[in-house]
Image (cartoon, rainbow, N blue to C red):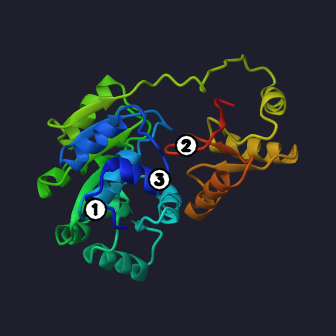
Amino acid sequence: MDTVGKPAQEVLQNVFGYNDFRHNQQTIVEQVIAGGDALVLMPTGGGKSLCYQIPALIRPGTGIVVSPLIALMQDQVMAMQQLGVKAAFLNSTLSATQASAIETQLQSGELDLLYIAPERLLNERTLSILSRSNIALFAIDEAHCVSQWGHDFRPEYQQLRILHERFPTIPRIALTATADKRTRVEIIEQLNLHQASVYLNSFDRSNIFYAIAESGQAKQQLWQFIESQHAHDAGIVYCLSRKKVEAIADWLSEQGRVALPYHAGLSTELRAQHQQRFLREEGVIIVATIAFGMGIDKPMCVLSRI
């Protein structure tokens, strides 16, 4: 897409269809366009992706987006392609031939955005290809994965400081919707973002609330809640074990709802299929362990500890 050098406001309107930036998006975008590093903490739905997508379209080269969410990369790429953005992904779901074709596109400057799994990025062959390519920026999504304190810890993320060591002149933007003060310090330390500007948005979300109830007859309480308040809505029901996930998914299906299990014991293909259905169909309920949910951008109800 020929947007290199155009003003951020013009790209916002012409490509993404928004009239105005929200919160401090514009400041972040301008920081990265100018070549500066940034750490962005913004709630889900707050527009984090625009903070790297717009600079990637304006700066020369390809924006490299590091994401741990293999199952979501295809959706992110499809969304970009529908907007006319030349986007692709590199992860373990591709054949060697498919991956080679995308690497060729990267080196020839045919891509605006390339989504890539951290394991693939850290491969010496991939780093060598990146060194021969024109890179606009590195976006490190779900940056809280560097933290050993969190459920989403990914050891590969702690190795991403190599991006600064190998590509010191290319700006980096780390983004997360989940980071307390200790995690923010860890992100800065682990990714060597000491010179980065930190942007912290309010996490007050008026559309999010908690309701706590004592568990008696859990299944009946769950069904009453769904039927009375979310009869046609999508949702996630979190369970404490894989066995419970399967049992609750089967039971909800018997009640007439589309309920799909999701846990680490299922095959990669089945997990991806269930996640795709949840994202694309209306009213689907995912019954899951904590293996599901990071990066999901969809209006829903969430229940836990069933």
User: In front here: 128 or 119?
Assistant: 128
Regarding residue 67, the answer to whether it shows in the image is: no
Mark 2 is on which residue type? Gly
Measure the alpha-carbon separation of dots 2 and 3. 25 Å
Q: Can you give x and y, in whole percent of width and height, for residue 218 in the image? A: 77, 27
Q: Which mark is residue 293?
A: 2
**Residue 301 against residue 155 in the figure, above or below:** above
Regarding residue 111, the answer to whether it shows in the image is: yes
Relative to residue 188, is residue 143 drawn left or right? right
Relative to residue 178, is residue 121 drawn left or right? left
User: In front here: 60 or 148?
Assistant: 60
Give the residue at mark 3. Answer: 16
User: In front here: 21 or 223?
Assistant: 21
| Residue drawn at 43 percent across, 35 percent down | 22
Which circle, 2 or 3, is nearer the viewer? 3
Quarter of the picture holding the C terminus: top right
User: In front here: 239 or 35?
Assistant: 35
Give SS at disc 3.
helix
| Mark 2 vs 1: CB contact within 8 A | no
Relative to residue 222, is residue 122 drawn left or right? left
User: Reading the chain from its start, which is encountered first: label 2 or label 3?
Assistant: 3
Q: Using the rendered view, name the quadrant where residue 281 is placed.
A: bottom right
User: Reading the chain from its start, which is encountered first: label 2 or label 1?
Assistant: 1
Give the residue at mark 1. Answer: 4
Q: Can you give x and y, in whole percent of width and height, for residue 201 in the image? A: 38, 27
**Residue 81 against residue 306 in the figure, above or below:** below
Q: Using the rendered view, name the quadrant where residue 252 is placed.
A: top right
